[in-house]
Image (cartoon, helix red, strand yellow):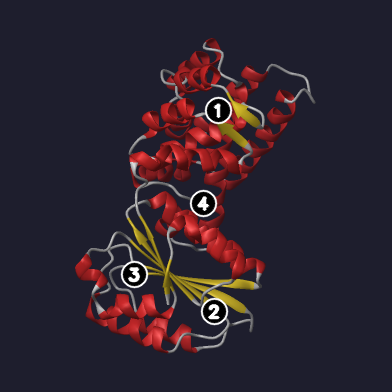
Amino acid sequence: MSRLNADQLGAHLQRSLAPLYLIYGDEPLLALEAADAIRAKARQEGYVEREVFTVEPGFSWQNLLTSGNSLSLFATRRIIEIRIPTGKPGTEGGQALQDYCARLPDDTITVVTCPKLDKQAQATKWFKALEQAGTAIPVYPVERARLPQWIGLRLAAQKQRADTTTLQFLADRVEGNLLAAYQEIQKLGLLFPEGPLLFDPVREAVLDVSRYDVFNLSDAMLAGDVVRLVRILEGLKGEGVAPTLALWALTQEIRTLAKLKQGQRKGAALPQLFREARVWESRQGLVQRALGRLSETRLVAGLKQAAALDRMIKGLARGDVWDELMQLGLGIART
């Protein structure tokens, strides 16, 4: 039906929803964001029920076709997600996808996700069936020449802006790693107010945490490495890093763990939960071990501590912010 670049998706969704989306490519951050945007728009339009099919060893393609041909359990609009991590559905799967596209279910938005697909894969009948049935969204790494512009657009979305020198500096720091770029942009949103960003403060903010990195702080908490956690927190404090940044790093991890615990309680498979929570493969072992020792109750208590700390940082409550940050991190690490 049509093909869109990832940066065209927002404007497309403001106009309409296609019955099917095929997202494929080798940039996980952009693929996840595209799927998130489609889901959010679908929910706004009343697609409240959601089914997820992940193609893995033992997967039954008949289950997908049966679901597609059946009415929604609650007679509501629904989202069906088909995830093909290998990008190779096989002979049976390829035929099933063609059959599915030939009879797209009513009142349903279908989202199919695949990794990077080469020309041979894009020439298959199943790929062409998906592309013709809806909208294809290839997601590719942002080219180095476009990276400053990409960062600038992300800053604009949080009502900040930077000059060419600052954008080039940020691009040099994160080249080849969009997740790192995403994290740096979030960090700048926490540290600085809306409006223009000056080069020197941005440079100091980025370089200050190169020795005692807030993401290493959260890793130490997840690993239960108390000695390392204390050393990093004291280093961040000594270098004058804003406590807001340390709180954000710890809270983000605790919130992710709580979400994963909740999903496990509801019976969802951990690989699926990792994908939805954007836990990259390199960190999944660390996160899984933390899940094994932490209860949902403990994590909820940690989020309440974090909320109280946020009030303290904003001057709405009294207390030693860095001491409370230490207690928050140690409370999770020692459990």
Of the image marks 4 and 3, the number of the one nearer the N terminus: 3
What amino acid type should be assigned to the residue bearing mark 2?
A: Thr
| Separation of residues labelled 4 and 2 (CA atoms) | 26 Å
Q: Which residue is mark 1?
A: 329
Disc 1 + disc 2, Cβ < 8 Å: no
Of the image marks 1 and 4, the number of the one nearer the N terminus: 4
Q: Give the foreground label among 1 and 3.
A: 3
Q: Which residue is mark 3?
A: 55
Q: Give the foreground label among 1 and 2.
A: 2
Q: Give the foreground label among 4 and 3.
A: 3
What amino acid type should be assigned to the residue bearing mark 1?
A: Gly
Task: Give the image location of residue 235, x and y in percent.
Answer: 49, 14
Q: Is residue 316 visible?
A: yes
The residue shown at (61%, 28%) is 196
Q: Which residue is mark 4?
A: 260
The residue shown at (70%, 24%) is 313
Q: Which residue is mark 2?
A: 108
